[in-house]
Amino acid sequence: MAVSVQRIDPLSDVGRHLYAGSSAEQMLRYGRDGGRPLEALADPEVFFVAAFLDGAPVGCGAVVPLEGDTGELSRIY
């Protein structure tokens, strides 16, 4: 079993697939999608990553800069 984490474009096919999974999970658990919009995660200042298991995308997350050296974890899935 090989695990890797890579920075990806959230607007890529893989990014969109993982974003949709994150949204579906939030809807199931909380009854709403409270995360950031996909387009906001495509900002060049945002660090969006995907986790792969044996080459297949299985999770994602983002670090979104706020103010100064403060950031927020978003779309952890």
Image: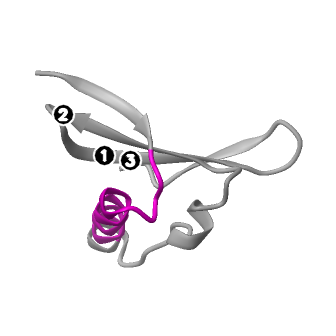
Question: Taking 73 as reference, is 38 above or below it?
Answer: below
Comparing labels 1 and 2, the label whose residue is closer to the camera? 2
Question: Mark 3 or 2 closer to N-term?
Answer: 2
Q: Is residue 7 left or right of residue 77?
A: right
Residue at the extreme top: 1
Residue 57 point in image, percent of width and height: 23, 46
Q: Label 2 amino acid? A: Leu
Please say whether residue 70 is one of the residues in the magenta stretch. Answer: no
Q: Quadrant of residue 28?
A: bottom left
Q: Label 1 amino acid? A: Gly
Question: Taking 71 as reference, is 6 above or below it?
Answer: above
Say whether marks 1 and 3 touch (CB < 8 Å): yes
Residue topped by disc 1? 59
Pointer 1: residues within 10 angstroms few (<14), some, or many (20+)? many
Residue topped by disc 3? 60
The magenta segment: 8-26
Pointer 2: residues within 10 angstroms few (<14), some, or many (20+)? few
Q: Is residue 35 left or right of residue 19?
A: right
Q: CA distance from mark 3 to mark 2?
A: 12 Å
In the depicted view, which residue is nearer to us: 31 or 22? 22
Residue drawn where x is 43% and y is 74% of the image:
33
Residue drawn where x is 47% and y is 54% of the image:
9
Q: Quarter of the image for the N terminus: give it.
A: top left
Question: Mark 1 or 2 closer to N-term?
Answer: 2
Residue 63 point in image, percent of width and height: 60, 44
Q: Quadrant of residue 29?
A: bottom left
Residue drawn where x is 30% and y is 57% of the image:
14
Res 53 label? 2
Element carrying mark 2: strand
Element carrying mark 1: strand
Residue at the extreme left: 1
